[in-house]
Amino acid sequence: HNRNPCFSLTLQSSRVMTPVFAISSLAGRNVIPPGVHGNATWSPRMTARGGEHLGCSSFKTFKGGHGASVHKSPPRRAHRPVISCASLTVQEPSTGVEFPLVQKFWLGEEMRCIGAGARTKKVAFLGIKVYAVAVYAEAEKAARELGIRARGGFFESDDDYCSALLDGGFHKALQIHLVRNVEGTQFVEALAEALTPRMRLSGEMEKLETFSSFFQGQQLSKGSVITLLYRTDATLDIALSSPERPADLAAARASLCIKSASLCRALFETFLGESSVVPEARAVWAAGARQLLASDEVRRDTRRGGSG
């Protein structure tokens, strides 16, 4: 029997996350998957290689306490197809920008979107949206590390969850999607204003200059995507793609790599730290971290239940 149905999740909130553990671990269990909150609907979707929809004739439905429903398909007999999940996205509500829920970057590791927020610039007393930004992390590694911290009593506030994402020993990324035309100089000068005090303290201003020079003279049109990947070896990878030539990030190569723990930390602290340039997004990212933690707790409970 095929007990590995593939599920699709319709997301209507940037706070929704899918479970970290394999969906197949739910087979035969009357449980609601963790991390399904708000307006979210799970439905079975089996797709053969090439995109052919296979469908299911009957479903069993469970109702969750947050308006979510789970549909589980009956087992299918061999010959079973190659199964892949439908593409899922997380939407930043104020800009409408959608980010892939699951994404592979050039390191080859699968990463999950923790949530998204928007950068607003004040111009003549008006708030102008400049870009949407999402945080990605290696979900399974992040969830396990969050679990260790939770069992140690580390978490009390949103600040603690954002600090855990910032300090965690796993790959993480910022993906920035421009929603208006911006000159590269303007973009990097706004970041450099926040980065300079931190980099001056570390004595690595030349690293910041290398980072800034990459954007000098660039024309960042609406729809451009900037990916900033913080590797566990304290290297910052930078990639830029235009709407005319969108990049396949799994096959892409970083346009620039800067080895600097100080720059990596300062850049991600600019977004995740207490003085974030997107302060409203910190609550979203903290909620995403909580959902990763919940997924780890259910994974642990599922393993304990399975061993009995």
Image: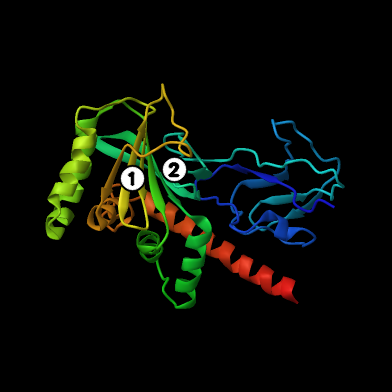
Q: Are marks 1 and 2 in contact (CB under 8 Å)?
A: yes
Q: Position of residue 48 (x, y in %)?
A: 73, 36
Residue 124 in view: no
Number of marks in the image?
Answer: 2
Amino acid on which disc 1 is placed: Asp
Q: Secondary structure at mark 2?
A: loop
Q: Residue sitting at 60 percent across and 56 percent down?
A: 19
Q: Earlier in the sequence, mark 1 or mark 2?
A: 2
Q: Secondary structure at mark 1?
A: strand
* 191 on left or right of 64: left
**Tag 1: Cα neighbours inside 10 Å, few (<14), some, or many (≥20)?**
many
Residue 38: numbered disc: none
Residue 223 vs 105, above or below: the answer is above
Amino acid on which disc 2 is placed: Trp
Q: Residue sitting at 40 percent across and 52 percent down?
A: 172
Tell me where residue 126 sits by quadrant: top left
For marks 1 and 2, give the CA distance: 10 Å
Which residue, as the protein is rendered here, is positioned at the far top?
244
Residue 238 vs 159, above or below: the answer is above
Q: Position of residue 226 (x, y in %)?
A: 35, 37
Q: How was the colour assigned to the protein in this rendering?
A: rainbow
**Tag 2: Cα neighbours inside 10 Å, few (<14), some, or many (≥20)?**
some
Q: Position of residue 291 (x, y in %)?
A: 53, 59
Q: Quadrant of the C terminus?
A: bottom right
Q: Which residue is mark 1?
A: 237
* 158 on left or right of 301: left
Residue 115 in view: yes
Q: Residue sitting at 77 percent across and 58 percent down?
A: 27
* 235 on left or right of 251: left
Q: Which residue is mark 2?
A: 106
